[in-house]
Each structure stands twice: as structure tokens, then as C-alpha cells.
């Protein structure tokens, strides 16, 4: 069922000096796209999804819209306590939701701390509930908050950890599940859907927004990186039972708690061959920066079904400034896509969405050229988890035209490339082995 929309624009919210979130009825909420502040369209507003969180933005003042003029206006201090400091507020949305606007704020000084590695969506208040400028981008419920029962997860995880004390990867995933609340790890221990297979402690990029390794003095990483390379046998002990028994099973190399999986191509190739000797059920996937085309070709030949390519931009200079690659370029990424497509394998682009950049006309044109030339199958609409101002400074973004708007961007990409599918998660592909999900893709 489609999410409801409000019948008028919600009002601005802010945090007072005690961290309490308050609403201010004299200003409407605003959304931000790059340096542009906009009144959200009613159709772009949905109730704050279950499982989302609200974040305070230190050193940043909220911006709203004056109802009469439609102009952006900064709220400088607390209307309830004049002269007292306030902070802007943003929503970090639950999975499967994509932002239309980021939170609207101004950063008046130069000493505001970097925001942690999360996404910051515009949020407002109307009729006793919070609303966000976003849409649900994938109906798949695999990471919905109401699908996770804490007691059941705890019991299933402890049981498997006890059963496999010598499998280092299962023990590692236990920490991911119980300490970090990783949804993929939780689903693995619950025996369903997509299971993670982190493999690589090393990386050949130094992504500015890396969630598993950050330099000292920067914003902290959100989880610990794996410190060992699991053996093919350890990988098989996880993957094969999952592929054989789980509903709509997927196993995925390349997780937030590791570096670049293609650096361990030899181990992964051996593991995939072991998986496919045991079962042809399910989807074997690799989430990757797609930096090593020769390794991709080897894995495709071994039985890799799908590849999800991490991509912040379709322009070489912006790609290079974000990934800070060591020994590869966007040309190698394009070649890796071709290696999969030439073998009739499935390719997703894990395209980071940031309003004001993703929908910049120059970025849109470059993205369309990439899609036209290399014909990926699927676009995963993932919100960029990074301080927006830091990101735009890092890649040197200078807008020469107003952004299109994320809705129009989405519609126009779909119109130009009707074969493309959109979503949020890695899709289950091997439909011939299961009838419990609508068909997405069948490998020929």
C-alpha cells in the first residue's frame, strides 16, 4: 500500500539547547538540494518510516520556508527561549527509502564538526507525526524493522556461534549481528534472504566516506573491518546451507565490514566453485568497486551470478576524488561491467543518491552515457552516507545549473532506458529454483 501524503507542508523542526526536538509553526519545513532550498512537494512527503532515527546536527542552524513568500529563512535561536542556541535536525531513514531532499540548514562558522557517516534527510512535523522528503524505493521487506525480533535473533545467533566455534567468519558475523545490528548478518542467523560473506581485510581505494576504516581525527567509522581472509571452506560452510534452505537466497561478497573483495579473487573463485558443486540454487553476488576487470571475468566464469558496482559519480574526476583509487580508474569499472554483461551476468549500479549532485544536469548526462554504453540491469538507489557539505567540497562540485530534482531524475532515467529496473537491495535472480517471489531476472 502506498504511503500517505500530508495535505499541507509540515512545519520546521529544530533541537533546543537540551537536545529536545521542537516544532516551529511559523516556518514550513524546507528541503535542500546542493545550495538550493526548496519547499517539498506534498507528493514527496511520507511518514517517517519505522526504524528510522532523528539526528541533531551540531553547529548547523535550521532553515525553513516562509509560508507567504515561499522564501528560505534561517531560524537563528530558540523561539521558546530567545537567545538560546539551537541545532538543525535530520532523519536517518530506514533501509529501502530514498531521499528527495536532504536536511535544510546553514553552517555559519568554520568550526562545525564533520557529521558522522550517515545520510541526512529533510524532516518536518504535521498532525502529531514526523514527515520526511523521500519515497520507498524497494517494496522488499528484508530489512524492515518489524521483521526483526531481538530475542529470536539473539537465540539463533548464540546457537550458531556455539555450533561453529572454529569458523572464524561465522564468529565475525556474530559480532556484526549482536554488536552492530547488521541487518544482513541478522538475516543470515535467521536463515533467510541475503547472507553476507565478508572476505577482504585490504582495499585498493581510500574512499572518503568509507564506513569501515577512517584516518585518525576524522569522523569515526561505523563498524570494524574484518582482519582475516576466510578460507573457501569457511565460506562454503556459510553459503551452501543458506543457498539450499533459505527463502529467496542470496549470498554476497563485499560488505561494509571489509575492504575490496576483488583483492581476494583467488579465494572467492575457489569458494564459488565449491558452492556451485553443491547447489545451483540461489544467487551468488559480489558487491565491489569493480576495479579489476580480469578478476571479475574469472569470477563470472566460476559462477558469479551478479555484481553490484559501487558508484558515486559517472564522471571520472568526481569518481577519483571520492574513491581515491590506488591503481584503477573509472575506465576499469566500465570494463568490469562489460566483462559481466559479455557473459550474460546481472549488473547493478549501487548509485549513491545525494540531492543536488546526483540530479545535477552534468552528472545526469554523464550517468546516461554510462548506462547507454554499458547497459546495467538494475539501479540501487542508495542514499550517500556522508556529511553533504564535506562531500561536495571533496569532489569539487560546482553547479552551473539548478538541480533537476530527484523525482524528475528518476522518471527521466526510467523513460530513457525502459529496460532498467530500480530498487534498493540486491535482487534474487535464480527464479527457476523458486516460485515464492515475482520474477526479476533469469540468467539465460
Image (cartoon, rainbow, N blue to C red):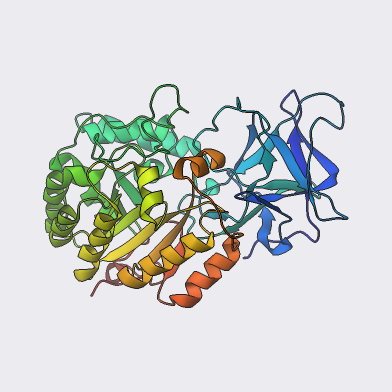
Place of residue 172 in the rendered image (x, y in percent of width and height, measured from the top left):
30, 32
Q: Quadrant of the N terminus?
A: bottom right
Nearer to the camera, 152 or 281: 281
Q: Quadrant of the C terminus?
A: bottom left
204, above or below 3, in the image: above
201, above or below 240, in the image: above
Nearer to the camera, 65 or 342: 65
Nearer to the camera, 256 or 100: 100
Nearer to the camera, 190 or 441: 441
**Residue, x 57% and y 27% (percent of image)?**
113
35, above or below 211, in the image: below
Q: Is residue 190 visible?
A: no
Place of residue 241 in the rendered image (x, y in percent of width and height, measured from the top left):
24, 50
Residue 75 placement, left or right of 38: right
Residue 296 placement, left or right of 418: left
360, above or below 398, in the image: below
- The picture quadrant where one finds residue 225 is top left
Report the label total: 0
Q: Is residue 75 visible?
A: yes
Residue 214 placement, left or right of 44: left
Place of residue 398 in the rendered image (x, y in percent of width and height, measured from the top left):
53, 50
**Residue, x 41% and y 31% (percent of image)?**
178
Place of residue 200 in the rendered image (x, y in percent of width and height, measured from the top left):
23, 38
**Residue, x 12% and y 46% (percent of image)?**
266
Amino acid at each position: 500500500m502506498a504511503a500517505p501524503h500530508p495535505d499541507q507542508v509540515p512545519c520546521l523542526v529544530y533541537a533546543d539547547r537540551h537536545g529536545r526536538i521542537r516544532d516551529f509553526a511559523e516556518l514550513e519545513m524546507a528541503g535542500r538540494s546542493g545550495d538550493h532550498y526548496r519547499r517539498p512537494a506534498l507528493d514527496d512527503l511520507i511518514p517517517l518510516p519505522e526504524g528510522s532515527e532523528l539526528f541533531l546536527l551540531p553547529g548547523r542552524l535550521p532553515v525553513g520556508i516562509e509560508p507567504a513568500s515561499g522564501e528560505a529563512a534561517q531560524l537563528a535561536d530558540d523561539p521558546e527561549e530567545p537567545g538560546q542556541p539551537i541545532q538543525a535536525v535530520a532523519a536517518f531513514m530506514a533501509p529501502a527509502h530514498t531521499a528527495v531532499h536532504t536536511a535544510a540548514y546553514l553552517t555559519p562558522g568554520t568550526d562545525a564538526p564533520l557529521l558522522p557517516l550517515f545520510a541526512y534527510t529533510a524532516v518536518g512535523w504535521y498532525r502529531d507525526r514526523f514527515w520526511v522528503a523521500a519515497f520507498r524505493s524497494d517494496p522488499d521487506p528484508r530489512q524492515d524493522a518489524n521483521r526483526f525480533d531481538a530475542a529470536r535473533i539473539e537465540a539463533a545467533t548464540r546457537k550458531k556461534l556455539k555450533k561453529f566455534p572454529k569458523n572464524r567468519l561465522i564468529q565475525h558475523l556474530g559480532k556484526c549481528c549482536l554488536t552492530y545490528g547488521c541487518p544482513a548478518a541478522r538475516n543470515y542467523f535467521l536463515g533467510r534472504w541475503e547472507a553476507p560473506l565478508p572476505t577482504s581485510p585490504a582495499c585498493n581505494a581510500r574512499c572518503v566516506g568509507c564506513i569501515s576504516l577512517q584516518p585518525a581525527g576524522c569522523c569515526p567509522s561505523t563498524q570494524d573491518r574484518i582482519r582475516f581472509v576466510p578460507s573457501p571452506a569457511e565460506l562454503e560452510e556459510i553459503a551452501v546451507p543458506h543457498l539450499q534452505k533459505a527463502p529467496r537466497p542470496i549470498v554476497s561478497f563485499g560488505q561494509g565490514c571489509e575492504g575490496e573483495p576483488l583483492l581476494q579473487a583467488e579465494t572467492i573463485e575457489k569458494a564459488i566453485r565449491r558452492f556451485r558443486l553443491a547447489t545451483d540454487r540461489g544467487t551468488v553476488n559480489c558487491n565491489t568497486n569493480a576495479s579489476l576487470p580480469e578478476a571479475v571475468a574469472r569470477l563470472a566464469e566460476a559462477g558469479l551470478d551478479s555484481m553490484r558496482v559501487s558508484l558515486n559519480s559517472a564522471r571520472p574526476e568526481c569518481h577519483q576524488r571520492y574513491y581515491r583509487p590506488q591503481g584503477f580508474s573509472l575506465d576499469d569499472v566500465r570494463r568490469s561491467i562489460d566483462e559481466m554483461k559479455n557473459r550474460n551476468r546481472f549488473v547493478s549500479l549501487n548509485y549513491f543518491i545525494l540531492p543536488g549532485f546526483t540530479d545535477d544536469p552534468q552528472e545526469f548526462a554523464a550517468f546516461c552515457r554510462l548506462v547507454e554504453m554499458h547497459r546495467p540491469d538494475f539501479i540501487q538507489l542508495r542514499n550517500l552516507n556522508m556529511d553533504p557539505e564535506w562531500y561536495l567540497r571533496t569532489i569539487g562540485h560546482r553547479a552551473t545549473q539548478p538541480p533537476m530534482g530527484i523525482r524528475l531524475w528518476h522518471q527521466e532515467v526510467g523513460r530513457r532506458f525502459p529496460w532498467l529496473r530500480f530498487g534498493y537491495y540486491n535482487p534474487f535472480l535464480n527464479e527457476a529454483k523458486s516460485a515464492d517471489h515475482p520474477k526479476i531476472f533469469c540468467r539465460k
